[in-house]
Amino acid sequence: MKNKGIAIELTALLDVILIMLFWVMLNMERENERVKTEAAEQAAAYEQQVSEISEELNTVRADYDKVQSEFDRYISENSDSIAAANQKALDEFAEGRMITLNLTYDAVGKLFILGEDGELGHTLLTGREDIAANIEKVLRDEGMSEDDVILCALVYDGDRALYSDVKLITGAADDVGRKYGNFYCTYINISR
């Protein structure tokens, strides 16, 4: 083709464009296949992870079911004895047999540990560990074991008692409760 003296050769130009277009399409096809292959590999890896996690979950479920059945068996075998121990403690409480912790003040604060027949022991408010040790000693001396249900009441006059002393005694009672699993203590402020 001629146009005002400039000769344009379209055939060669079309050949170059078609070659470039073919090359781009070929590269895009290769890239698509590479992406598909990587995606398939990642999917297979995720499926493997899911399978492993599922197996671990099934193992954990089996262990949980085993522990739950043992717990249920233990409760069914021991629920009568636990209920009987709790009922015995409540009956004794109704008859006035319980441990009373009585906080009093003379020149210094003292904690008297009382039973149904009177004083079982006493201690100065020297420290949480000392108070807990004295309460535990009284419980042992009274023949109470760590499995017995023990009801207790801390009695104090809120108008006279120091907050720090009450906190010290309640902390000691909590410590006793950690050793004696069925040690239950209530707190009674007689000034209210």
Image: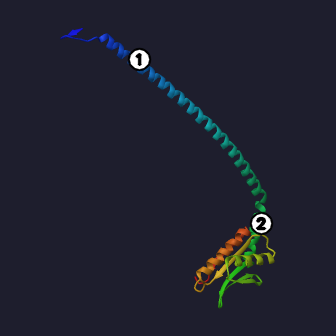
Picture quadrant of residue 83: bottom right
Residue 14 in the image, given as x and y percentages of width and height: 33, 13
In this orientation, which residue lies closer to the viewer: 25 or 135?
Answer: 25
> Mark 1 Cα within 10 Å, few/some/many (few <14, many 20+)?
few
In this orientation, which residue lies closer to the viewer: 49 or 102?
Answer: 49
Which quadrant holds the C terminus? bottom right
Residue 162 in the image, given as x and y percentages of width and height: 59, 83
- In the picture, measured across the screen, residue 118 lies left or right of residue 57, that is right
Q: CA distance from mark 2 to mark 1?
A: 90 Å
Residue located at (76% from left, 81% from top): 116
Residue 58 in the image, given as x and y percentages of width and height: 68, 42
In this orientation, which residue lies closer to the viewer: 172 or 49?
Answer: 49
Q: Secondary structure at mark 2?
A: helix
Residue 188 in the image, given as x and y percentages of width and height: 63, 79
Residue located at (73% from left, 82% from top): 114
Question: Is residue 96 positioned above or below 19 on the image?
Answer: below
Marked residue nearer the N-terminal end (2 or 1): 1
Residue located at (29% from left, 11% from top): 10
Label 1 is placed on what type of residue? Phe
Pointer 2: what residue? 84
Q: Is residue 95 visible?
A: no
Q: Residue furthest left?
A: 4
Question: Given this view, does label 2 or label 1 mark the residue nearer the observer?
Answer: 1
> Mark 2 Cα within 10 Å, few/some/many (few <14, many 20+)?
few
- In the picture, measured across the screen, residue 116 lies left or right of residue 38, that is right
Which label is found at residue 22?
1
Question: Is residue 164 positioned above or below 47 on the image?
Answer: below
Label 2 is placed on what type of residue? Ala
In this orientation, which residue lies closer to the viewer: 92 or 102?
Answer: 102
Q: Residue furthest bottom?
A: 107
**Do callouts 2 and 1 mark residues in contact (Cβ within 8 Å)?**
no
